[in-house]
């Protein structure tokens, strides 16, 4: 055991995600540590094997696989950041039908989903491993009594549908750090740049193909900046060439925070065209931080951050006409774009800053600790087969 490296008076984050990496969970963890109060350790626990868990004030788990290593000797909460806990592919999206999956996990249903509906990987070995892992995660629900934090009400309802007791779930929307660089409402000069912005991984679920096919139906002066990388980039560059859009698109690749901030500040709107049910999506909040309106898909947790007609425009996923209409609407109306950006910024400052998020998170911590029974080191509250 190596429990001596831990402080018994601190709360520990447990994660296999890389803090500050490129994904949403990694960014969230970076924000969390940036605003970390004194009773939360800056040490990330990557494995709970061979650790005396009775010594911890509280464990906050972010990676599903670490649930399989719990012994139940200390207060624990688990943040559900994505769909991988209850969906083998982690997408809840049937690419073949271009629809969101409404099934609960089952071997038969998910096999059909992969083979027929093209949900995630169709490779037999990988699919079998995904099924086994999801089965293990959901089986854990029968053995543990911890608090599950969902980053949207959409995710919370998915948890309940898949067997998590409602009383063990709570919705806590994400927060972000407000940029230190100066920001200002959308000016007429910037609006006349005629630029829109896509930020995200270049993969099929993020809806960039839909956006490219929409762009040809928008005013030809509109320019699209694409910030991100992904395995579909080459294919989508070919599509842009076929659609004769090359002179209207700039592919920026991966961008650091300074470059990304500049791209946010030179656009008149941010487009969030995901076709899979985004669990939450930090892009909306990052746009609000720069006073920019968001045009987003009405899927997953996106509508919980985007107020249609107030902070942006919601459109049905894969609907080219509706997306084109929304882009053109903000393109011709500076005052509406500016107003929505200001409303988005006000909403961010009221509900979605990291300070607000952390305040609510600490309330959950305190409740979890207070309700945890007296610990007896030699007695486990439950027994989960430990992973090898």
Image (cartoon, grey):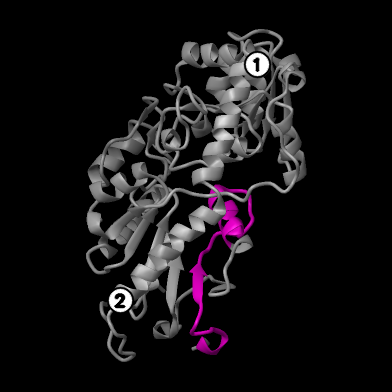
> Is residue 183 highlighted in magenta?
no
Image x and y of residue 183, in percent: 72, 37
Q: Quadrant of residue 36?
A: bottom right
Q: Residues within 10 Å of mark 1 (few under 14, many from 20)?
A: some
Where, quadrant-wise, is the C terminus in this rendering?
bottom left
Image x and y of residue 86, in percent: 33, 50
Picture residue at 30% right of the left edge, 42% below the top = 110
Task: State how far apart marks 1 and 2 are (Cα).
Answer: 54 Å
Above or below for 250 versus 143: above
363 vs 82, nearest the viewer = 363
Say which of marks 1 and 2 sits in front: 1
Instruction: Identify the secondary structure beneath mark 2.
Output: loop
Q: Residues within 10 Å of mark 2 (few under 14, many from 20)?
A: some
Q: Is residue 384 among the parts visible in the rendering? A: no
Above or below for 29 versus 301: below
Q: Is residue 40 among the parts visible in the rendering? A: yes
Image check: 290 left or right of 68? Answer: right
Labelled disc at residue 281: none
Above or below for 6 versus 230: below
Instruction: Identify the secondary structure beneath mark 1.
Output: helix
Mark 2 lies on residue: 372
Picture residue at 24% right of the left edge, 69% below the top = 143
2 vs 323, nearest the viewer = 323
Asked whether the beta carbons under mark 1 and mark 2 sit within 8 Å of each other, the answer is no
Image x and y of residue 205, in percent: 49, 33
> Is residue 17 highlighted in magenta?
yes
238 vs 99, nearest the viewer = 99
Image x and y of residue 30, in percent: 61, 58
Image check: 265 left or right of 306? Answer: right
| Range of magenta residues | 3-32
Above or below for 10 versus 229: below
Mark 1 lies on residue: 334
């Amino acid at each position: 055991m190596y429990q001596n490296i831990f402080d018994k008076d601190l709360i520990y984050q447990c994660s296999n995600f890389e803090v500050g990496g490129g994904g949403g969970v990694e960014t969230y963890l970076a924000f969390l540590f940036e605003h970390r109060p004194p009773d939360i350790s800056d040490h990330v626990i990557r494995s709970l094997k061979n650790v005396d868990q009775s010594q911890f004030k509280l464990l906050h788990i972010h990676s599903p696989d670490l649930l399989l290593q719990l012994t139940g000797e200390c207060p624990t909460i688990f943040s559900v950041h994505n769909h991988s806990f209850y969906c083998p592919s982690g997408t809840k999206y049937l690419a073949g039908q271009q629809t969101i999956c409404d099934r609960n996990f089952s071997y038969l249903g998910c096999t059909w989903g992969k083979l027929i509906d093209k949900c995630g990987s169709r490779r037999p070995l990988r699919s079998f491993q995904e099924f086994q892992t999801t089965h293990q995660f959901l089986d854990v629900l029968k053995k543990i009594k911890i608090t599950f934090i969902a980053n949207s009400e959409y995710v919370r309802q998915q948890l309940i549908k898949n067997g998590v007791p409602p009383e063990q779930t709570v919705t806590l929307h994400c927060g972000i750090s407000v940029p230190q660089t100066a920001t200002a409402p959308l000016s007429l000069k910037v609006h006349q740049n005629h630029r829109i912005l896509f930020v995200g991984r270049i993969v099929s679920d993020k809806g960039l193909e839909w956006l490219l096919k929409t762009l040809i139906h928008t005013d030809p002066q509109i320019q699209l900046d694409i910030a991100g990388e992904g395995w579909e980039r080459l294919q989508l560059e070919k599509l842009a060439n076929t659609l004769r859009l090359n002179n209207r698109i700039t592919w920026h690749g991966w961008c650091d925070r300074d470059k990304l901030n500049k791209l946010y500040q030179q656009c008149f709107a941010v487009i969030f065209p995901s076709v899979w049910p985004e669990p939450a999506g930090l892009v909306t909040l990052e746009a609000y931080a720069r006073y920019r309106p968001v045009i987003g898909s009405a899927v997953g947790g996106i509508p919980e951050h985007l107020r249609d007609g107030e902070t942006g425009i919601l459109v049905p996923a894969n609907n080219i006409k509706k997306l084109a209409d929304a882009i053109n609407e903000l393109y011709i109306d500076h005052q509406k774009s500016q107003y929505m950006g200001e409303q988005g910024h006000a909403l961010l400052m009221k509900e979605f800053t990291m300070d607000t998020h952390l305040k609510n998170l600490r309330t959950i911590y305190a409740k979890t600790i207070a309700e945890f029974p007296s610990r007896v080191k030699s007695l486990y509250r439950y027994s989960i087969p430990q992973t090898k």
